[in-house]
Image (spheres, rainbow, N blue to C red):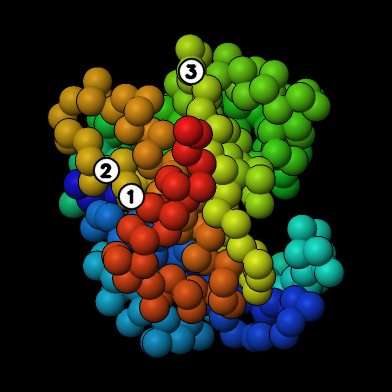
Amino acid sequence: MPVLIVGSIAIDHVKTPYKEKQNLLGGSASYAAIAASFFSPVQLVGVVGEDFPEKYRSLLASRLVSLEGLQIAKGKTFRWSGIYHSNMDRRTTLATRPNVLQNFSPTLPEVYQTTPYVLLANVAPSLQHHTLDQVKSPLFVVASTMDFWIKKAKKALLSLLRRVNMLIVNEHEVQELTGATNLICAGHLILKMGPEFVVLSKGEHGALLFSKSSLFSCPAYPLETVYDPTGAGDTFAGGVIGYLASICNEKNSSKITFEKLRLAVVYGTILASFSVEAFSLGRLHALTQPDIEKRYNSLHALSQFP
């Protein structure tokens, strides 16, 4: 089944303890779309400027990502720069230039409007609402956000939570959203805000999947070296929705069980573990299906009890 993904498309400048690189493909929609494309066709909605490199359009198109919903606006593409510190867990944003993203209004081509699986990747809640307004009877909607929107657009975000099936947030964002310091309590508080399911991403410590009656803890895949954590959360979200769409029935939401969501979270975790092994989308671009299945088997073996 196809997946609709709306989010940002950016040109990044990233500095880590290992290296500094400029003019990288970034943005929440870029990472999520490539990740989802390993399992399902992707319909991308976003905006870029006239300066957006053709090689990045080609990269997206090579992954069965439809660019019919990609707007090319007059001006420059959204640009972000940041630096990661020694433990790679802390990041300082050096510059954010919204450019054409500042006036972006998502417009869905007609063929996109009946897509059953939707990922509202990290953009302003108003844009997430506007996208959802154009989708006819979606089967399963996943949203992600960030602390900036929790602080600046909390009312719109809370309204969005009543319209989505699942929210994906990290441990810092969930504390900002709920005020709870205990992650289990925080997860249950978000469930009361509207979504049927919540995923709390804990980075190198894995992820928690919540429903009202169940809880699943997925371990992270152990890595010796992390080169660039940028986009790992978006990759995770793309992997989750892409895998879910590949195994569920288009017309029957009851087929979306907690057990299937557990598997989707595992595959999202695996995709994110590959993403951080190189700058930008370099590792994902070179990734193969056998690579994914091999790592799935390794993670399965690592997390089994006798």
Q: Residues within 10 Å of mark 1 (few under 14, many from 20)?
A: many
Q: Position of residue 232 (x, y in %)?
A: 57, 59
Q: Earlier in the sequence, mark 3 or mark 1?
A: 3
Residue type, numbered disc 2: Ala
Q: Position of residue 261 (x, y in %)?
A: 38, 33
Q: Which residue is at a point 17% across and 34% down the rendered structure image?
A: 249
Q: Residues within 10 Å of mark 2 (few under 14, many from 20)?
A: many
Q: Residues within 10 Å of mark 3 (few under 14, many from 20)?
A: few
Q: Which residue is at a point 42% across and 28% down the rendered structure image?
A: 165
Q: For residue 138, what is the image quadrant? A: top left
Q: Which residue is at a point 65% across and 50% down the rendered structure image?
A: 203
Q: Nearer the viewer, residue 45 or 140?
A: 140
Disc 2 target residue: 245
Residue type, numbered disc 3: Ser
SS of the residue under disc 1: helix
Disc 3 target residue: 214
Disc 1 target residue: 242
Residue type, numbered disc 1: Gly
Q: Are marks 2 and 3 in contact (CB under 8 Å)?
A: no
Disc 2/disc 3 C-alpha distance (Å): 21 Å
